[in-house]
Image (spheres, helix red, strand yellow):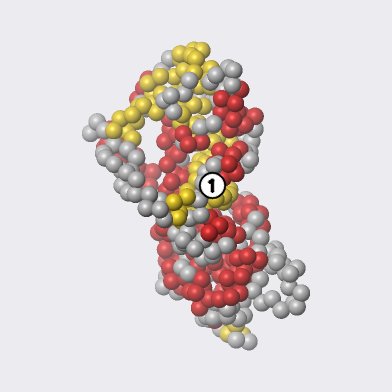
Amino acid sequence: MAEEEVQSGVLLNTDVRGSKYLNKIFPLLKRLHDDGCARDKARNRTLFYDQYVSLILLSMFSPAMQSLRAIHQASALKKVQGLLGIDRRYSLGSLSEAARVFDPQLLQGVMEELSKDLTRLVECYDPRLSKIPRLMLADGTLLKALPRLAESMWKTSRSGNPMHGWRLHCQFDLSLGVAVDMEMTDYRNSMESDEREVLKDRLQSGRCYVLDRGYLSWRLLNAIEAAQSDYVCRIKQSTIYCVAQERPVEKQALAAGVKTDLLVHIGDQDRPRSRASHAVRLVYIEALVWPRANRGSSQPAGPPEKQVLILATNMLHVPAEIIALIYRYRWSIELFFRFFKQVLGCRHLLSDDPDGVRIQCYCALIASMLLAIWSGKKPNKASWRMVGWFISGLASEQELLAHLNAPDNTGVKLAKREERWRQMGL
């Protein structure tokens, strides 16, 4: 790596450690430069949208930049200025105002452009799923906020304290290992923020949507069918249906825990909104399920116990064991949410403004895409840590490349673990 040089008081991008890895995103961010400038009648704006997003993206790879004040302090560092192409230290007021000036939806376009460079990651899924349409795992997570955020206040806790926050709705592409679509609403999960309505408005063709029972709505599932996509959705035990055909369960399906395979007519025929407009298949699967955590606790209420899950799907000709396998991967989006909050720093919100929260969330998704592009693997904490060390100067380029090019034995290890569980009868 060349020695850092200074020209006119600013480090050259070509000489700054890590700039070549960020050059993938800088040209896309340049398109945002003029957003928010229309209100600047005096033409004295110094902090532009692309610079603001660059600073937030850099904070995603540095645990020392997990607050707006830390970003403000970092903007004064010559190396940061050279890396991001900025030439001044930005005030806290400018950084705070930026969240209310710039349009977060423009970052959706950046994500779409960046997603073209993502490659299908074989290690993310079982090869038996190769003939299934792109698996989109849909779910939502809650972003807790500070008590002063009155706009996000939605209800009170048992003690009477107001609860605040937003709900982040994501679509996670299993084959790419990253979330490719995002929407943020209020905390309530009702009316406009209902996760089923949000997903219905963002459906695409040629997908297979994997949904938990919170998404159960025949209006949504009918919309997925109408959009020429597939779904696998867990349904409630109390669902009303009429059996049209009981299908034989093959040996491979029995080994996967499949108990029953049915073609059914769903719902009350006198209530169109509560019935399926297409043929529905129900697959009953016996599986080990962790009981829900007690309220106020993050730990399961007890050891896993055997339960029968009912999966509804419109894929009538896919083997039952593949339907079970598809739903098994639904948990991948929960692991992504953990990475999103714990590693990329979205537990702490940099802005009080809803648009500021959206910008931070989009930046976190862009950071995860960059990790996937750089490594060719699903984003993980180890890769994030190495990129952060490289940008900060603790790791050399050779050490970073050695890590990114190291073989991934995750699938082998998981297969061996599954075999041990089977040998133990669990």
Q: Residue at x 44, y 19 (%)?
A: 261
Q: Amino acid at mark 1?
A: His
Is 200 situated left or right of 188 in this image? right
Q: How many marks?
A: 1
Q: Residue furthest left?
A: 424
Q: Position of residue 55 (x, y in %)?
A: 56, 69
Q: Position of residue 330 (x, y in %)?
A: 45, 39
Is 181 situated left or right of 399 in this image? right
Q: Position of residue 89 (x, y in %)?
A: 58, 80
Where disc 1 sits, the SS reads strand
Q: Residue at x 33, y 43 (%)?
A: 293
Asked where in the image residue 101 lies, by quadrant, the reply is bottom right
* Closer to us: 214 or 56: 214
Mark 1: give few (<14), some (14-19) or many (20+) Cα within 10 Å.
Answer: many
Asked where in the image residue 393 lies, by quadrant, the reply is bottom left
* Closer to us: 200 or 210: 200
Q: Residue at x 70, y 65 (%)?
A: 35
* Closer to us: 83 or 307: 307
Q: Residue 390: in sight, yes or no? A: no
Looking at the image, residue 261 lies above or below residue 396: above
Disc 1 designates what residue?
169
Is 63 situated left or right of 190 in this image? left
Is 41 situated left or right of 105 in this image? right
Looking at the image, residue 70 lies above or below residue 404: below
Looking at the image, residue 313 lies above or below residue 418: above
Q: Residue furthest front?
A: 160
Q: Residue 239: in sight, yes or no? A: yes
Quadrant, the C terminus: top left
Q: Residue at x 74, y 69 (%)?
A: 39
